Image: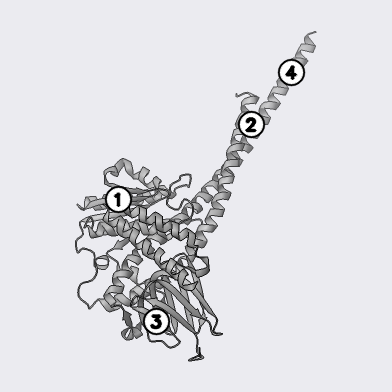
Amino acid sequence: MPSLKEFRNRIASVKSTRKITSAMKMVAASKLRRAQTQAEASQPYAARMAAMLQRLVSKMDAGGAAPLLMAGTGRDQKHLLVVITSDRGLAGGFNAFVARLARIKIRELLDAGKDVQIICVGRKGRDALKRDHGSKIIHTYEGIGKKRLSFADAQSVADHVLGMLEAGDFDVCSLVYNQFKSVMTQTPVAQQLIPLQAEAATTATPDEQPQNEQGALYEFEPSEEEILDRLLPRNLAIQIYRALLDSAAGEQAARMTAMDNATRNAGDMINKLTIKYNRARQAYITKELIEIISGAEAV
Amino acid sequence: MDKLTDKTFQFELVSPEQVLASEQVYMVEIPGEAGNFGVLADHAPLLAAVRPGIVTITAPDMSQKTLFVAGGFADVNNNVCSLLAEEALPLSDIDTAALDKEMADLKDDIVFAKDDQQKVQRLQRRVAVVEAKLYAVRQAA
């Protein structure tokens, strides 16, 4: 049986842990709000970009050589995975889920005899993948979105990917990240970026459909191909930006949930410890009383 | 300037980070890749690349607003004109002193990065944007 002092110390330490976790929860909640607003603010741009792209692509399929970004290299040998996680832990299963999906993907690709390269965005992803696939990690971005996630961050990742594409370093590029479904759920998803998949181009809102029929009358300035050439890299950056925002919001949401649970668990633990402490105290008092009484009786 | 038409159309200026304008307007002047162009109501469908420069928005009451855009794409269709800008901000928010400093920094960076072609290209793109910003402010002043 631990002494009373030991109980007191344990209760005090669990209480201070609870203080920390509840503070972290508050911080995550306020950061989550900010991240969510930012994610919503990026929606109009992404939606219009998708609509514009679809309009162009629907006209392009008849035309000759499609750009590299859309058609890919025509091979399917070298794969590049961009794995987006957070820099910080203590966010429940947030990073573990992405890492697991990434590992499954890598296994599948390796079993199929493909080459795999990895770019990690966020330190936790690198840490998780380093042990099994350390040699395949070619670059890690850290500290992205430490203050406020800006489009320039996504652009620098996109530039890196584009540079590799031009150098012929990979044939297929996919993003692995946590999609923000709601505060309670973030789902890890793998999304293919290059070559552009048909479904990625059809994310346009349904009400764009009727306007599409007017597509034949469109004027392009400069030419269609040139616009497409410029639009596709933009689209890549936007997709990455959107994934980064989703991941940032998801991270805060996951941390908020995890810290909420931790705070509640600490509360439960304090209650249990307090009961034990009281019992021990009463036992001690009873013991002393018995000693006094039996001492008095002996006299 | 006389009004050519009483019709208005929906103009939307969006950057990846926010929606900067979404309103009924009389006319918009956009710095297109192949030269500036004005959009009035009932413009023919157009998809144009936009270079860094000034966008002038004329409201139905003929008041004007100017914004800087750092390149992007303009889409005119069905009396909706959406301008997808890489970056956009009101002219009044541009800080010339900060830009001059950024320009000097970028030029230094280019000298340092001269072996890395990709980096140089990226920096040059930023220089072009800063130059356009400076030019836009001086024009307006």
Which is more toward the observer, B9 or B112? B112
Callout 1: helix, strand or loop?
Answer: strand
| Chain containing mark 2 | A
| Pointer 4 or 1: first along the chain | 1
Residue for badge 3: B37
Residue A118 is marked as 1
Residue for badge 2: A276
A286 lies above or below A116? above
Image quadrant containing the C terminus of chain A:
top right
Identity, as a three-letter code, of the amino acid under mark 2: Lys
Q: Residue sitting at 29 percent across and 44 percent down?
A: A133
Q: Residue B53 appears at what percent x and percent y?
A: 41, 72
Identity, as a three-letter code, of the amino acid under mark 4: Ile
Identity, as a three-letter code, of the amino acid under mark 3: Phe
Q: Is residue A198 visible?
A: no
Which is more toward the observer, A17 or A122? A122
Same subunit under labels 2 and 1? yes
Identity, as a three-letter code, of the amino acid under mark 1: Ile
| Chain containing mark 4 | A
Q: CA distance from mark 3 to mark 1?
A: 44 Å
Residue for badge 4: A290
